[in-house]
Amino acid sequence: MSTEAGPALGAKPGHRRGVEGVHFSVWAPDAQGVDVCLFEPGAPVEHERVGLQPIGNGIWAAFAPGLVAGQLYGLRASGPWSPSTGHRFNPARLLLDPWSLALVGDTERLALQTGHACADPLHPTQAWDEHQPDPADNAGHMPRCVVVDAQAELAAGRAIAPGPAIAGERVVIYEAHVKALTRLHPEVPESQRGSYAALAHPAVVRHLLQLGITTVCLLPVHQHISERHLIERGLSNHWGYNTLNAFAPEPGYAAATGGQCPARAEDAAAVRAEFRQMVDILHRAGIEVVLDVVFNHTAESDLDGPTLSWRGLGQTRWYAMGDQGRPHNFSGTGNSLAVSEPRVLAWVMDSLRWWVQAFGVDGFRFDLAVSLGRDAALGHAFRARSALLSAMAQDPVLRGVRLIAEPWDVGPDGYHTGGFEAGWLEWNDRFRDGVRAFWLGHGGTRGELATRTCASSDLFQRHHRLPTASVNMVTAHDGFNLADLTAHRHKHNAANGEDNRDGHSHNLSANGGVEGLTDDPGVQHRRGLWRRALLATLFCAQGTPQLLAGDELGHSQQGNNNVYCQDNTITWLDWAQGDTMLAGFVASLAALRRRHPGLRHARWFGGAGPQPDIIWLDADGTAMSPEAWQAHDRHTLTAVITVGESGDTPTERLWVTWHAGPGAITVPLPDGDWALLLDSARPAVHLVGEVVAAGQITLDDTGVWVLVQGLHGPDGHLPGRS
């Protein structure tokens, strides 16, 4: 079969014996009957049912003549109702096709569409094993699936400009939320703000290019819904980690529909077209598009949650099941997908290939990726060579895209940073914590800092992996952003409605002496030093740097470290009040990284030989002793890096110093002339540095310094100097 055949199951327009129609196929091995319900646009009930027939391997199928692309439909499945054994079939519930390529209709309160009778879905009180099927037909409250011409979609995907070919060591990731990034951008037309079109607007693209971003990683854009507890509080799932449809772009980010759910098949097509245009424009600007995807759980929540698709077609097949009919909850959201099941694996793979082929995306960041490696045959233990993870590695479509793991989940033995195979990149929380501890006074040692800034070789230098496997981050969407990390010692999450119980409490943050906003110039100065030092550490570290959108602008989330439900000015970037000087500093850091290979070495440092690639020095210029590495009362460390571009003979060496101690310190320099490139305490980034006084340099305050010395220059000048 061609790799561009489209998803294996679902609704496919075609012909049979010269008659036009649609072939429907649904996987529901434990069902006793499956029907396709056909709807006219806007109609609350179906006008026709097509009974599917079992054709083997758990698949139900039928060809419906006379139908064409654009037809609206839903599914109904009959079978046993036995909560204690996991079966929850209810033919009164209209179900969504897991392989549907588009949906139309309102999804705002879908979390309340339970398959069991419940007087108040917002406040369930009945024990789950006492649930009885709700006999009421809920078709009037459910969206419709749309028959889509997959071949036409794939052709539209081929028309997208190819993604840029970016070497791994040159990747700079920008983690962003489509709406939060663009909702308040003053140069974007009001009608486009918060949308895919806004992300592709020249002003936003220009900002990304000025920052030196190569890869935008978007928080989930799969169509998603809000959970019942958020509906009750009048909030919404802003981040989108609650997937409803794994093949369709979230319409809430589409200018084409005004951010509303599509009402017609044509509206859904306009959303897809807008998404493709965004990818095309970013590609033409030299920027990759990576999607944060959620395949560890679905939007059906726990057993008090809704029956929307997977649960109604066969809960015991789609979900990893525990005892007495309960799904496992490795995600912390109520369920976990059974990715060891071949058909569930195929569904995930079909979705991933679809986004690459039909929408042109360049890779994926997998939320709670350990769940994807849990093997049912091993008691749901994690295995790096599990069926799904191995399938991604060898798939002819996916093996060429970026695969990034969040290497943990909340299940038993769920932490596996460094545990994925070659070819995978991983979020490195050890970098985050080690760097925060060093700069913000939480007992970080120089040994920990050196290990983390050298791509965490203790975690990733195995299985033939490269330093780029470490995705370094100081902040991410989950937790404090940079402004709040340096202004708050404690989380302030009252706006989430959970009495400040949610969100991490171990943040390794600092406030400079005052909690939150302050006009104190001393406190502001200290916070500025920290922010620039943290950013400089990120961009001057080996591995793959990831910047959180808004950190370059000094955006604050008011001390909230769990803004998943804040679709408002707490998360929307305030461009008008943005710190343009800080943004310029970040842009200069990225340019410095591009220019000097010692800041992005593609191989592991060895530290040996007549001209070592890296040498570590104490504050007095002597080699680090074993005791010095773990001393908690010393806060200055220097590395001298001597490497060339992509294995070429070195033409320069870099002197990089991290100084987190209070006040100034004078440190010796190795012999020869050195030129200052970076002084984050001022801040100052010089792409063409000025020669400093020979022999020593004074580090005025907390910060990162980078100096360069030319080697083997044909004219005796430092690189970049005339």
Image (spheres, rainbow, N blue to C red):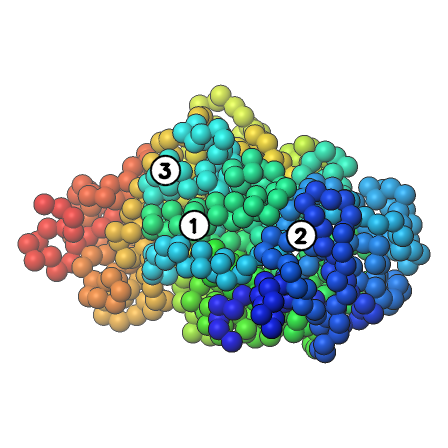
**Circle 1 SS class:** helix
Above or below 385: residue 238: above
From the top left corner, tell me how far across and down residue 396 is, in percent.
46, 72
- Which mark identifies residue 279? 1
**Is residue 214 visible in this depiction of the protein?**
no
Identified by mark 3, the residue type is: Pro
Contact, mark 1 vs mark 2 (Cβ under 8 Å): no
**Circle 3 SS class:** helix
Along the line of sight, which residue is nearer the eye, 10 or 697? Answer: 10
Above or below 480: residue 272: below
Q: Residue at x 37, y 41 (%)?
A: 205
Q: Earlier in the sequence, mark 1 or mark 2?
A: 2
Q: Residue at x 69, y 50 (%)?
A: 144
Q: Residue furthest front?
A: 18
Q: Residue at x 66, y 64 (%)?
A: 65
Front: mark 1 or 2: 2
Q: Quadrant of the C terminus?
A: top left
The tally of labels here is: 3
In the picture of the structure, the residue carrying the numbered disc 3 is 202
Q: Seen in the image, is 300 located left or right of residue 352?
A: right
In the picture of the structure, the residue carrying the numbered disc 2 is 72
Contact, mark 1 vs mark 3 (Cβ under 8 Å): no
From the top left corner, tell me how far across and down residue 581 is, in percent.
35, 31
- Which mark identifies residue 551? none
